[in-house]
Amino acid sequence: MDKLVIEGGNPLRGEVTISGAKNAALPIMAASLLTDERCVLHNVPSLTDVDTMIKILRALETGVARKKGSIAISGSFKKTRAPYNLVSTMRASVCVLGPMLARAKYAEVSFPGGCVIGPRPIDLHLKGLEKLGAKIEIKSGYIVAKAKKLRGAKIYLGGHFGSSVLATANTMTAATLAEGVTVIENAACEPEVVDLANFLIAMGAKITGHSTPTIKIEGVKKLCGVNYSVVPDRIEAGTYMLAAAITGGEVLVKGANPAHLLAVIDKLRECGINVAERADGIIVSRPTMRKIRPTALATLPYPGFPTDMQAQMMSVLCLARGISVITEKIYPERFIHVSELSRMGSRILLEGPNAIIRGVKTLSGADVMASDLRASAALVLAGLVAKGKTNIHRIYHLDRGYENIDKKLSLLGAKVWREKED
């Protein structure tokens, strides 16, 4: 197992190219099961989560070939059981449920796993599929779904903390081959959902309203294979934007779409960070003498501030001049990184879903433990600016969502490298 070692203190400067979005690529890969024709996906990042989805597709006896950022998938599958040993490692694995049910009228999928960031039930997934006519049972830790025929329906996908990206994806993919019209109310509006809808439309699906809370799907009898390029990763882009801000550098984040990052851009500007939008990306800069201003923010469903950027923003606010407040409204327990940031000298008080951050002048390098994907990124940002050396352990979390992060940071001037754990 590797650890990441960072010697802090170097402002980041230069250009970084953003990879394809993991959270778009995974549901799109699963949706390739909706056709028996070949789908070729481009701009697919090289990540362990993508590797896991490939293994799941191969476990279903689907042909998958990978080459230089592209993946070719033959949608024909002979098995309908997604096994525990793979699905339990990644929450997005559940996205194969809808496509398999739509094609084969039967699917067995283990309950999904992934990062430990609080309860993330799949009740909305099951609700959406049941409204389409599926009968669902839970047997020995597996979701067993069957249907003689799927029929369009009006479905409300409201959850306790708002809409669900993956539940919207599962319901939408299944509805593409259902008989009649399906209307999903309180659908997720995230760019990754829009990208999935655009992929399905390219396959021949009839979908309107994607990017709004009301998605309408008119079922078709058959979908075809396509060539499709995955949208750039807005969370990776946001992370590098914050890396430039926290280190007092200047970075062009190439491929970043400003329309996907409005809430992040707004908060950076509130904190006194320069953000310039360009045709090829976003430039973020902060003179090293300019102090970071404190702010208050709450995570919300898109287009609000992303929960997947909360931990990284907390690292930035640890160095703000004053008191900041972060309210986590999506996953209220998503504060595991606080204890590790405290090891580096931060001053953070937790009160329920609120983190009260009193800015400090400096952070100090330390041995810290990554608990989940975005917490790992937060520790990287803190390490980039901390005095001394930071050792980040259990970085397999980081490799789930950031392609070549150590190499990309090194090209921007960071002192960062991997070492084998003792």
Image: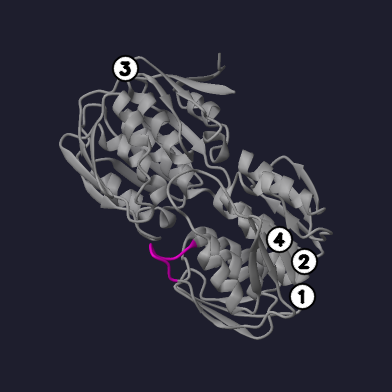
Of 351 and 74, the residue lying toward us:
351
Label 1 and label 2: CA atoms lie apart by 7 Å
Measure the alpha-carbon separation of dots 4 and 1. 22 Å
As for residue 161 lying within the magenta part, the answer is yes
- Name the element at disc 4: strand
Q: Can you give x and y, in whole percent of width and height, for residue 330 in the image?
A: 37, 56
Q: Secondary structure at mark 3?
A: loop
Give yes or no for residue 60 being in the magenta stretch.
Answer: no
Q: CA distance from mark 4 to mark 3?
A: 50 Å
Of tags 4 and 1, the one toward the viewer is: 4
Residue at the disc numbered 1: 222
Say if residue 248 shows up in the picture.
no
Q: Which residues are magenta?
A: 158-164
Q: CA distance from mark 1 to mark 3?
A: 59 Å
Q: Residue at x 57, y 64 (%)?
A: 169
Tag of residue 387: 3
Q: Is residue 365 above or below residue 77?
A: above
Q: CA distance from mark 3 to mark 2?
A: 54 Å
Q: Are marks 1 and 2 in contact (CB under 8 Å)?
A: yes
Q: Which of the two discs, 4 and 2, sits closer to the camera?
A: 4
Which residue is tagged 2?
35
Q: Kindly check if marks 3 and 2 are in contact, taking CB atoms under 8 A apart as contact.
A: no
**Is the stretch drawn in magenta largely helix, strand or loop?**
loop
Q: Earlier in the sequence, mark 3 or mark 2?
A: 2
Which residue sits furthest front? 140
Q: Number of numbered discs present?
A: 4
User: In what quadrant of the picture does the N terminus appear?
Assistant: top right
Give the residue number, with chain letter if any, for mark 4: 108
Earlier-in-chain disc, 4 versus 2: 2
Q: Position of residue 130 (x, y in %)?
A: 60, 75
